[in-house]
Image (spheres, helix red, strand yellow):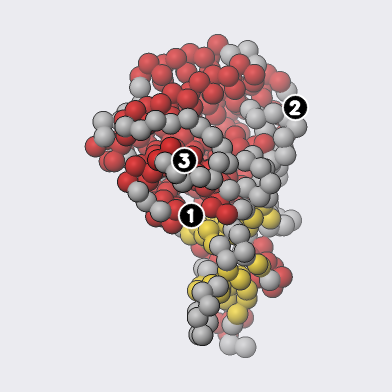
C-alpha cells in the first residue's frame, strides 16, 4: 500500500464541512479505499460516484438503499452522521421520528454536555434556554428572509407585528407549554405570509406525500427539508457531545427531542421559504433539495449552529 493510502487526509472540522448527501436506491460501499455509491440504473456498465467523507457532514439514505459494514466503519471513523429515512426524505416511522446512526467517538468534548445537563435539570434554566432559542429563531428568520432575493422579489418580509407579538409572548411565558403555544401561532403566521405572498392557499399537513396541488407539494417539501434540518442539528449536537435526549422545548420524554429544538433554527429561516418557493416555481424534489442545501451552505449554517450552542452554554453555565 502506498504512503498516500497509509497517511489518509485529516477530516475537516464538522462545523466547516460543505457536503450533504441524500441518496435513494443506491448501494454505499468502500471501494479502492474510497467511499462510493452505486446507482440502480439498470445499465450494462456500473458507475460509481465518490462521497468525500472527510468533507461530508451527514448522509441521508432513502428508500431502496443499502450500506456495507466497511463503508459504515469508514463513515464513523470520519465522523459522518448517517440518517435513514423513507421516500422523499420523510422519516421512516412517523412525521416526528428520528433514525440516525451517530459516529461513536470516545474523544468528543464533555464540557458542553456537563453544562447542558446541569441546566436541563433546573426548570428555570431550561425555560431560559428555550426562550433564548425562540428569540434566536426570530432573529435568524428576519436576517435570512431579507437576504432571500426571491422572497424580496415577491414582496415577502417578516411581518413586524407578528415578530413583536411572538417576542412578547416569549418574554411573558411562564413555562414550556405557553412557549409551544406561542411557537404554534408563530409558525402559522409564517405559513400564512408565504402562501399569501406567493398567491396560493395552504394548510400544514405533515406526511401527506401527495403532489396534486401546490399546497400538497409545499407540504411534501417541508417534510423533506425538515429532515435535512434534522441532519444539520444532529451533526452539531453529536460534534459537541450533547445528548439528543435533553430537549429544552419539545418535551422531556420525546426520543431525540433536542434535535427538533435545534433544527427549528434552520426550518423557519431556510426550509420553509424554499419549500414554498419551489412549489410555486415547479421545482422537482431534487431541485428543491439542491436549492435548500446550497442556501444552507451559503449561510454557513453548520458553523452558525455550533456557535449558537456554544454561546448558549456560556450564558447558562
Residue at x 54% of width, y 45% of height: 209
Q: Secondary structure at mark 3?
A: helix
Of tags 3 and 1, the one toward the viewer is 3
The quarter of the image holding the C terminus is: top right
Q: Is residue 189 above or below residue 312?
A: above
Q: Position of residue 284 (x, y in %)?
A: 40, 53
On residue 121, which mark appears? 2
Q: Which mark is residue 216?
A: 3
Callout 3–callout 1 Cβ contact below 8 Å? no
Question: Does label 1 or label 2 sit earlier along the sequence?
Answer: 1
Tell me which label, 3 or 1, sits earlier in the chain. Answer: 1
Describe residue 53's horizontal placement relative to residue 197 as left or right: right
Residue 260 point in image, percent of width and height: 61, 37
Counting residues from the start of the chain, the first of labels 2 and 3 encountered is 2
Decide if residue 268 is in sight here.
Answer: yes
**Nearer the camera: disc 2 or disc 3:** 3
Amino acid at each position: 500500500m502506498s504512503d498516500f493510502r497509509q497517511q489518509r487526509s485529516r477530516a475537516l472540522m464538522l462545523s466547516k464541512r460543505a457536503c450533504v448527501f441524500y441518496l435513494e436506491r443506491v448501494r454505499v460501499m468502500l471501494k479502492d479505499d474510497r467511499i462510493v455509491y452505486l446507482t440502480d440504473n439498470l445499465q450494462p456498465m456500473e458507475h460509481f460516484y465518490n462521497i468525500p467523507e472527510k468533507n461530508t457532514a451527514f448522509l441521508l439514505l432513502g428508500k431502496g438503499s443499502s450500506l456495507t459494514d466497511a463503508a459504515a466503519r469508514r463513515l464513523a471513523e470520519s465522523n459522518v452522521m448517517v440518517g435513514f429515512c423513507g421516500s422523499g426524505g420523510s422519516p421512516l416511522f412517523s412525521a416526528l421520528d428520528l433514525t440516525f446512526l451517530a459516529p461513536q467517538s470516545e474523544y468528543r468534548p464533555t464540557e458542553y454536555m456537563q453544562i447542558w445537563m446541569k441546566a436541563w435539570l433546573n426548570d428555570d434554566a431550561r425555560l431560559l434556554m428555550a426562550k433564548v432559542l425562540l428569540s434566536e429563531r426570530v432573529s435568524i428568520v428576519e436576517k435570512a428572509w431579507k437576504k432571500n432575493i426571491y422572497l424580496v422579489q415577491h414582496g415577502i418580509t417578516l411581518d413586524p407585528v407578528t415578530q413583536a407579538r411572538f417576542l412578547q409572548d416569549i418574554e411573558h411565558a411562564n413555562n414550556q407549554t405557553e412557549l409551544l403555544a406561542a411557537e404554534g401561532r408563530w409558525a402559522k403566521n409564517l405559513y400564512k405570509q408565504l402562501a399569501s405572498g406567493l398567491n396560493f392557499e395552504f394548510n400544514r399537513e405533515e406526511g401527506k406525500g401527495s403532489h396534486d396541488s401546490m399546497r400538497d407539494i409545499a407540504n411534501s417539501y417541508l417534510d423533506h427539508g425538515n429532515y435535512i434540518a434534522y441532519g444539520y442539528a444532529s451533526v452539531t449536537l453529536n460534534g459537541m457531545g450533547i445528548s439528543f435526549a435533553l430537549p429544552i422545548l419539545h418535551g422531556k420524554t420525546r426520543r431525540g427531542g433536542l434535535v427538533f429544538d435545534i433544527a427549528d433554527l434552520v426550518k423557519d429561516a431556510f426550509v420553509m421559504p424554499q419549500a414554498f418557493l419551489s412549489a410555486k416555481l415547479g421545482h422537482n424534489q431534487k431541485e428543491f433539495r439542491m436549492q435548500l442545501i446550497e442556501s444552507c451552505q451559503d449561510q454557513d449554517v453548520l458553523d452558525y449552529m455550533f456557535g449558537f450552542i456554544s454561546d448558549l452554554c456560556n450564558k447558562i453555565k
